[in-house]
Image (cartoon, grey):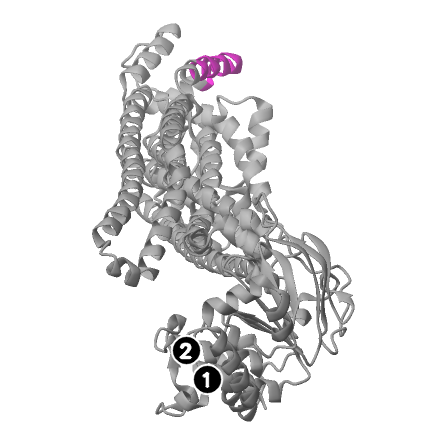
Amino acid sequence: MIKILKFAKKSWYIILAIILLLFIQANCELALPEYTSNIVDVGIQYRGIENSVPDVIRRTSMENLSLFLTEEQKQTVLAEYTLLDKTKIKEEEYQKYQKAYPKLSEENLYILNDTGLKKEEKEAQIEKLKEILAPAETIYLLFTSQGEQAEQMRKQILGAMQIEENTEIDFFTLLSSLPKENLIQMKENIVKEMTVSSDTMLESMAISFLQEEYQNIGIALDKVQMNYLRNVGGRMIALALLTMVAAILVGYLSAKLAARTSRDLRNQVFQKVVGFSSEEMNRFSTASLITRSTNDIQQVQQVLVMLFRIVAYAPIMGIGGIIKVFHTNASMTWIIAVAVGVIMFMVMILMQVAMPKFKSMQKLVDRLNLVSREILTGIPVIRAFSREKHEEKRFDSASRDLMKTQLFTTRTMSFMMPAMMFIMNAITVLILWVGSHGIDLGQLQVGDMMAFITYTMQIVMSFLMLTMISVMLPRASVAADRIDEILKSETVIHNPENPKKDVIQKGEVRFENVSFQYPGAEECALTDIDFTAKSGETTAIIGSTGCGKSTLVQLIPRLFDVTKGKITIDGVDIRQMDMKELRRKIGYVPQKGILFSGTIASNLKFGAPDISNEKMEEAAAIAQATEFIETKPEGYETGIAQGGTNVSGGQKQRLSIARAIAKNPNIYVFDDSFSALDYKTDITLRKALKEKVSEATVLIVAQRISTIIHAEKIIVLEDGKIVGMGTHEELMEDNKVYQQIAMSQLSKGELEKKGKVSERSES
């Protein structure tokens, strides 16, 4: 995963924006269960009363509550309230308060002083008053309620004061006659007993007192309740909308980040591969490079999208959920620990089973790509040898191996989802079982239990999301390693740190004791090659198959680097030159003509896009390609299929030669490029080439004697060594290898005749 993130580091600002949005989204989602709990507990059960501190209270009720307060507590409470005396306020204020509190006409009220307080000051005021008033309100409710416990308490007090039960007397008037210390001690004993069994019962009973008090004042509790529900519901809708917007933005930015990263990766991989020498191409293989440039980058792109939408989001939600759980009810956190432990154990088992298969999957994709490519490119040969059934079996074998691995990993991972759903449902049942006992004992509110279930599901879902992404991460991790292997690979052939520029003027090529050995080979392909190809001359190289002719000319544009010795152009070692400049000065025509999809014009201008159409047509004329180009309806705009499959071998070769000529280089390298041409075209082309590029250095690798018979210098190779050098006549006199090649192609009489015909043609 670190490597995948490393690929995306250029877009760090997008990553920061995504993480910020994820925190916003998580905070919104984590706040919703708390609001749900408030709707159930406060909005429904408490009818919209948020705490046990009265906003307004009757004067008699305040005096009755004061019976259970110390003098200091009483002064503290009264300091936070203002007495609303109906006889002393103005008529306008009286009408306003009368509308809000209809019973004001019957009794004076105390109003809480909360106007102008900041949020922190308001919270501190509520906490201070709650601590003082909640126990007193609970005792008040116990004495005034119709329950059995309240009746027994009243009987005990009347019995202790030797007063008959049926005596008509105000109970609080009776309590006021008791010593203050006894009342406070009574309150503390009852409150202590209640808080031991439940932390929430005290608050619940205090709010029940407020409900009765507000009704006695004439406050419409239904209106209070609906206002609260609308307020909390509106906040929940706002949070849901904010969550939606954040989720949409995260999805958009994640997709943009992944697409941008995959684009950059493709560019980096392509640039790296383009700079590979033949050694790296052979080491990685074309099929593997195609898979790494497409399928592997696609895997990384898919995981990057999921990485920020799920992997980064899951721990934020999980940790936030755990924090919220501790604020809700810490007594059931062991349930979450059990759930997480079971999930982690299951994921570890699945990963141990599936990970080896994920690692082998990409290699199997390489294998399938390789077989497919070989079959598709070799269809003519396969049909010619009637090997269709064999190749079908080979393809089927590679396809089945991949299918079996994919089926194994898919079946293994498919076990994960039902197992996770079972764990989630089992956890829900366990919370309901434990929570119902807590509600029955008064230790837990219904809303708190609902919030706890939601937070638990969020925590479990966070781990579930991580396990879901774990299906993709192993394969993407392997893909990232394979991409990184390309990007980190050191190219054997590289540009010098301080290349010499503008050094090629004439284009004289000099091989100085050059030897070359292919990587991994036991013997040298070329040994002690020493010659000079002068500008204005044609240097030909001939020899039997496998003697090293193509290898020799491939050393000039540095498709390979020499193992020993050096190659110079105009006296400068080519390893000290800028490779782009070196190759720009060389017109290389490979043994096998390669054309690209496009048009004839785009192929001819491939090496020199800025040349004029006149120069392009001149190059085509020199290469003897004009005759078949002009017969086509669209001329130079005629389309060329991929690989040049819609032109013949000779036409393809002539277009390849014209492409090299169009560059107008200083050095021409023809690697057996005339073998696909007939004798007439061969002679005409070489004659035109001699006239148009008379000042350039020309190196020709040939199999046919007729192609090189009039070269100024002919080099004869055998087993990677020079066994002869000179003109045709000189070699025919004293070089047995050259004589054998010449005699194997033409008889002695034909050679003499050929020489005369060629002389006339060249002249």
Q: Decide if residue 86 is in sight here.
A: no
Specify which label sits upstream in the sequence, 1 or 2.
2
Mark 1 vs mark 2: in front: 1
Cβ atoms under marks 1 and 2 closer than 8 Å: yes
Asked which quadrant contains residue 576, the reply is: bottom right
Which residue is pictured at 34% across the width and 38% down the height?
Answer: 216
Q: 323 above or below 630?
A: above
Give the residues in magenta: 176-192
Question: Which x, y percent locates residue 570?
Answer: 76, 72
Residue at the disc numbered 2? 650
Residues packed near mark 2 inside 10 Å, few (<14), some (14 to 19) or many (20 plus): some
Residue at the disc numbered 1? 681
Q: Decide if residue 695 is in sight here.
A: yes
Secondary structure that dominates the magenta span = helix
**Residue 635 included in the magenta stretch of the image:** no
Residues packed near mark 1 inside 10 Å, few (<14), some (14 to 19) or many (20 plus): some
Q: Secondary structure at mark 1?
A: helix
> Three-letter amino acid code at disc 2?
Gly
Q: 548 above or below 354?
A: below
